[in-house]
Amino acid sequence: MIYNEIINGQKIYLRMLELDDCKQYYADWMNDKAVNQYLESRWTEQTPARIQDFVKSIRESTHSYMFAIIFQNRHVGNIKLGPIHPIYKYADIGYLIGDRTVWGLGIATEAISLITRFGFEVLKLNRLQAGCFEQNIGSQRALQKNNYTLECINRQKAFLNYGDTYSDIYQYAILCDEWNKMKEA
Ligand SMILES: CC(C)(COP(=O)(O)OP(=O)(O)OC[C@H]1O[C@@H](n2cnc3c(N)ncnc32)[C@H](O)[C@@H]1OP(=O)(O)O)[C@@H](O)C(=O)NCCC(=O)NCCS
């Protein structure tokens, strides 16, 4: 789906991801083992053409939005909201900061905050949810900082592409009511 407005934050802004963003640097992020170790896309070698097909399918979908994260005028990562359940009004969120030079600057934390506001205030959703590998402490921390609650642990649901053991997946979510209370506080 397309949303043509900019979502402004303090140090970053979100804008719709364009086909023109699907360049080699973006494929390089997706093939970087440090970046992709927790992403399902890691099972396929990524190319600009493959990424373009994916971005096109999201833009044309009736259920998902994908934004570029812009920091200091640079595209440094992406954040997705969807698929949206059309009846129950919940959606998944997923994100990556592909440019490793900007890790640890609070960018994922702010991007989650902005997409959460978009989900509740613009799309009028009731619930947003995200799943993380148990090892992905940075991602869990960014969700916790946005008041997402750890709701359950799906035991041995997936495995990383190294090692020989299954990992647990931690499921986080936030409700619209909780978001509103947080804003009032
Ligand atoms: C995980 C990821 C999104 C974090 O992005 P980021 O912009 O560096 O995160 P932030 O700077 O907002 O950090 C959020 C918190 O996590 C902590 N953190 C970040 N990376 C961490 C790591 N590797 N280990 C431990 N803590 C970490 C930060 O210190 C911060 O906590 P604090 O404020 O208490 O110090 C980023 O590393 C990334 O995109 N990784 C690859 C893709 C991925 O894992 N996506 C998420 C899939 S669920």
Image: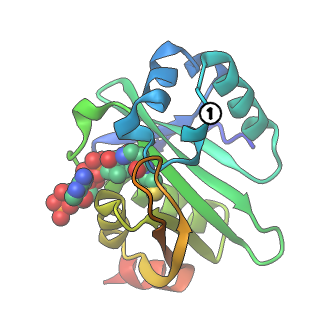
Label 1 sits on a secondary structure element that is loop
Front in this rendered view, residue 140 or 110: 140
Image position of 62 with respect to 180: above or below? above
Residue 54 lies left or right of residue 162; in this view the side is right
Residue 2 visible at all = yes
Identify residue type, mark 1: Thr
Tell me where residue 96 appears, x and y as whole percent.
44, 44
Mark 1, other Cα within 10 Å: few <14 / some 14–19 / many ≥20:
few
Please tell me which residue lies in front, 176 or 172.
172
Give the colour scheme of this rendering. rainbow
Res 165 → quadrant: bottom left
Q: Is residue 8 visible?
A: no
Q: Residue at x 71, y 50 (%)?
A: 64
Q: Is residue 74 above or below residue 64?
A: above
Please give the residue where the numbered disc 1 appears in the rendered image: 44
Residue 184, given in percent of the width and then of the height, sits at 36, 82
Q: Is residue 147 left or right of residue 18?
A: left
Residue 104, position as x, y percentages in the image: 21, 47
The number of numbered badges drawn on the structure is 1
Ligand 1 contact, mark 1 (Cβ < 8 Å): no
Question: Which residue is found at the position 43% from the left and 36% from the top?
Answer: 77
Judge whether 88 appears above or below 95 on screen. below
**Quarter of the image where the N terminus is located:** top right
* Residue lying farthest to the front in this orientation: 164
Instruction: Identify the residue at image location x=37%, y=76%.
Output: 147
Q: Quadrant of residue 63?
A: bottom right
- Measured as percent of width and height from the top left, residue 114 is found at 44, 55
Query: Residue at left 83%, top 75%?
Result: 87
Instruction: Depth check: give the residue in front, 126 or 152.
Output: 152
Q: Quadrant of residue 32?
A: top left
Can you say which quadrant of the picture contains the C terminus? bottom left
